[in-house]
């Protein structure tokens, strides 16, 4: 490989090197795609026109840049999609936590360090290696941080197929992984997409507590518990609160029930899981009452560096209040809720009052 002369670059060899570097940096899979997202663009525009994005205004704020990579980053010819696994074989069983109404369920991707920081750092290192190899390299790295159709790009690159819950699925690791991308101006050879393997299965649709997956591949985010507990900043619709159960940050039900994720469990003990994604502060198995007792300083201290941190303390209390309202009635639960009856936040007070009324108080 020689710098300074693009005509002397062997792009097939470069792609091989990129895969090797990526694995050294902790990524489990790499795929390369072109930038043609024409087929997905119409679906995106329809989804937006139906209002299913709710308050996710950023989904509509960038025009066609999301579905046209070269408009977002001029000169983009290829997209490198990368997968990093996060599933832990030591976290407490999710179904057990969900079955115990007094415990707090947190989506398993958020139990450790914020994946945005981990992936962005690794992607930047990979981009530096490419730049050092080919002087003409120009590009940009993304980790769920810009208008990027990451699932569709990953699908095109052969990393998996889109499940009926709209997430990417892999035969080896189900959907327990993060995705990152590098947009770049080099004409690397592209990979072929995989075949779909969902068949007639509809378990993800049937399990959804709020019926947010209204049809195969069609998600109304406004009903999704992940949206309600993370993205929605105001009051959670009253009719949806009982359906949230004890899920205080995100929801994994559609992933937990997926047969491909059940199959993937057998590979966990053989996989090297990124240490940064290890469970912190016992968040895989903690009571709602204990979390509700945190003051703001404790919230900021314990969740610094976590994806949860960005929702803020007020929203954190709002979510836990809903969980306590759905928890089995006990003196401990009622006492915990009563400690926040006079909270300065009207949002918190509203959800606490609802929770107490659920318990007849």
Image (tube, rainbow, N blue to C red):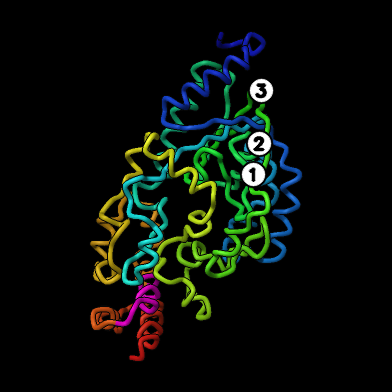
Residue lying at 50% horizontally and 80% vertically, measured from the top left: 238
Q: Quadrant of residue 189?
A: top right
Q: Residues within 10 Å of mark 3 (few under 14, many from 20)?
A: some
Label 2 element class? loop
For marks 2 and 1, give the CA distance. 9 Å
For marks 3 and 1, give the CA distance. 25 Å
Which of the numbered marks, if any, corresponds to residue 197? 1
State yes or no: discs 2 and 1 in contact (Cβ < 8 Å). Answer: yes
**Residue lying farthest to the bottom in this orientation:** 360
Q: x and y percent of residue 210 in the render?
A: 55, 70
- Closer to the camera: disc 2 or disc 1? 1
Q: Is residue 254 magenta?
A: no
The residue under label 3 is 189
Residue 134 vs 347, above or below: the answer is above
Residue lying at 30% horizontally and 52% vertically, measured from the top left: 304
Label 3 element class? loop
State yes or no: discs 2 and 3 in contact (Cβ < 8 Å). Answer: no
Instruction: State the quadrant of the N terminus.
Output: top right
The residue under label 2 is 194
Q: Residues within 10 Å of mark 2 (few under 14, many from 20)?
A: some
Q: Which residues are magenta?
A: 318-329
Magenta-drawn stretch, dominant element (helix, strand or loop): helix
Q: Quadrant of residue 188?
A: top right
């Amino acid at each position: 490989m020689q710098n300074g002369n693009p005509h002397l670059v062997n792009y097939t060899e470069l792609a091989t090197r990129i895969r090797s570097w990526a694995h050294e940096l902790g990524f489990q899979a790499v795929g390369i795609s072109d930038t043609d997202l024409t087929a997905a663009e119409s679906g995106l525009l329809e989804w937006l026109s139906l209002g299913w994005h709710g308050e996710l205004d950023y989904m509509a704020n960038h025009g066609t840049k999301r579905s046209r990579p070269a408009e977002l980053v001029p000169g983009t010819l290829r997209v490198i999609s990368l997968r990093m696994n996060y599933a832990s074989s030591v976290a407490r069983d999710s179904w057990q936590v969900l079955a115990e109404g007094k415990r707090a369920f947190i989506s398993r991707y958020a139990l450790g360090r914020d994946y945005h920081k981990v992936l962005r750092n690794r992607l930047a290192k990979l981009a530096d290696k490419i730049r050092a190899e080919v002087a003409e390299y120009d590009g940009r790295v993304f980790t769920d941080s810009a208008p990027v159709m990451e699932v569709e790009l990953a699908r095109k690159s052969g990393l998996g197929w889109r499940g009926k819950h709209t997430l990417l699925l892999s035969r080896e690791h189900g959907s327990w992984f993060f995705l990152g991308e590098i947009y770049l101006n080099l004409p690397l050879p592209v990979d072929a997409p995989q075949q779909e393997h969902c068949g007639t299965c509809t378990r993800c649709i049937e399990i959804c507590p709020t019926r947010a997956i209204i049809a195969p591949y069609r998600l109304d985010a406004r009903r999704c518990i992940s949206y309600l507990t993370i993205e929605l900043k105001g009051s959670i619709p009253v009719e949806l609160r009982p359906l949230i159960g004890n899920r205080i940050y995100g929801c994994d039900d559609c992933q937990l029930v997926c047969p491909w994720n059940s199959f993937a469990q057998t590979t966990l003990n053989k996989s090297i899981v990124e240490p940064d994604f290890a469970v912190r502060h016992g968040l895989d198995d903690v009571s709602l009452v204990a979390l509700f007792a945190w003051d703001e300083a404790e919230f900021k201290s314990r969740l610094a560096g976590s994806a949860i941190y960005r929702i803020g303390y007020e929203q954190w209390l709002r979510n836990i209040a809903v969980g306590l309202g759905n928890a089995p009635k006990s003196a401990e639960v009622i006492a915990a809720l009563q400690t926040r009856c006079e909270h300065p936040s009207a949002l918190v007070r509203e959800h606490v009052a609802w929770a107490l009324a659920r318990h007849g108080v």
